[in-house]
Image (cartoon, helix red, strand yellow):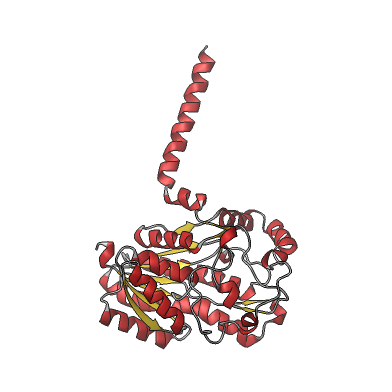
């Protein structure tokens, strides 16, 4: 199936990475279903998709509700056709030390970020597996491997998503299914989440540097949906965080304990009033768009993502270089 005929579902499509993902698929002329809670932001996302050349269907959905997700999937297939790609991106969190987070807050962040991914994947696979085709992309994070301070709900959810991802892939392999599930591991991204997620800190939250634009993440998700790669890494921080967690977890822990609290707080910047409640329990009005307030600091490309995408060519060039070096040394030894 050509890309312009694809039916794509994006959860968390109203802002941030999800918004950028929806626009990326729309650039191919896809039919894009937008699942999120905020109706104002969904309307903005719908305009973006249509302006980019796609067909948009806005479906107000709380992804923490499995019945709502299933109803949304039914509506998408009735109005747009069989779903080809499902992207799970919806998230929310609480920026705070763990002991300051109330049980209902932690549960809600987990229900949206982790269970939302579970219910989305379930709805997608129930339709894709009988057809023996389709692609599901889970938007992950370096925090799926290494938790950081002030991010216990989010880190816990991303760890859970990674374990869920591994399990689902083994089941599909057991069934010899052609449905593909991939996970894109991301660094800090310049999105509005730092303005609309709940915060209990004295200063305004920010992503851990270096920061990347949401379009970089969207390109990686789009690529993962069309290539049978198990995982895709974006950003050098993702690579060294994952490697550090595996090779020297004690060192990673000490480094993060020392740097990551201040690294997530803007200097001399009090929290916005909106951050006190955030979008945890209900979506605030307004349309935040795809970008946060950190455009001046954000990178619009990732060398790691380029290397990941072209790893075959990189391996071939490395082998050629090694061969040429070996030949040169052998000739030098003959002289």
Residue drawn where x is 43% and y is 74% of the image: 13
Residue 54 sits above or below residue 315 on the image: below
Q: Position of residue 26 (x, y in %)?
A: 34, 67
Q: Position of residue 28 (x, y in %)?
A: 31, 63
- Quadrant holding the N terminus: bottom left
Whether residue 216 sits left or right of residue 208 in the image: it is left
Res 19 quadrant in image: bottom left
Q: Position of residue 149 (x, y in %)?
A: 68, 69
Residue drawn where x is 52% and y is 22% of the image: 329
Compare residues 100 and 162 and report the one nearer the observer: 100
Compare residues 259 and 291 and report the one nearer the observer: 291
Residue 293 sits above or below residue 219 on the image: below
Q: Position of residue 177 (x, y in %)?
A: 32, 66
Visible residue check, residue 167: no
Compare residues 38 and 226 and report the one nearer the observer: 38
Residue drawn where x is 31% and y is 64% of the image: 178
Res 313 quadrant in image: top left
Visible residue check, residue 306: yes
Residue 36 sits above or below residue 172 on the image: below
Outermost residue on the top side: it is 335
- What count of labels does the image hold? 0
Compare residues 119 and 225 and report the one nearer the observer: 225
Whether residue 279 sits left or right of residue 130 in the image: it is right
């Amino acid at each position: 199936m050509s890309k312009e005929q694809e039916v794509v579902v994006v959860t968390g499509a109203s802002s941030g990475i999800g918004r950028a993902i929806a626009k990326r698929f729309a650039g191919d002329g896809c039919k894009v279903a937008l699942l999120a809670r905020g109706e104002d932001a969904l309307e903005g996302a719908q305009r973006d998709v249509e302006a980019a050349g796609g067909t948009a269907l806005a479906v107000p959905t709380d992804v923490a509700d499995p019945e709502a997700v299933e109803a949304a999937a039914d509506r998408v297939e009735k109005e747009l056709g069989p779903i080809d790609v499902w992207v799970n991106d919806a998230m929310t969190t609480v920026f705070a030390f763990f002991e300051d987070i109330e049980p209902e807050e932690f549960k809600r962040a987990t229900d949206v970020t982790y269970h939302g991914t579970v219910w989305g994947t379930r709805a997608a696979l129930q339709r894709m597996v009988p057809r023996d085709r389709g692609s599901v992309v889970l938007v992950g994070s370096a925090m799926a491997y290494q938790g950081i301070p002030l991010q216990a709900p989010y880190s816990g959810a991303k760890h859970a998503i990674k374990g869920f991802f591994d399990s689902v892939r083994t089941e599909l392999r057991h069934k010899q299914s052609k449905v593909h599930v991939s996970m894109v591991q991301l660094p800090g991204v310049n999105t509005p989440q730092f303005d609309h997620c709940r915060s209990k800190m004295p200063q305004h939250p920010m992503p851990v540097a270096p920061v990347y634009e949401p379009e970089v993440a969207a390109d990686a998700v789009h690529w993962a949906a069309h290539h049978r790669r198990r995982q895709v890494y974006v950003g050098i921080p993702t690579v060294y965080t994952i490697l550090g967690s595996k090779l020297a977890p004690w060192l990673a822990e000490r480094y993060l304990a020392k740097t990551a609290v201040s690294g997530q707080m803007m200097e001399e910047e009090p929290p916005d009033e909106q951050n006190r409640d955030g979008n945890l329990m209900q979506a605030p009005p307004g349309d935040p768009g795809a970008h946060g307030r950190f455009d001046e600091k954000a990178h619009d490309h990732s060398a790691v993502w380029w290397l990941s995408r072209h790893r075959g060519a990189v391996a071939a060039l490395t082998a050629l270089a090694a061969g040429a070096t070996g030949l040169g040394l052998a000739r030098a030894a003959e002289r």
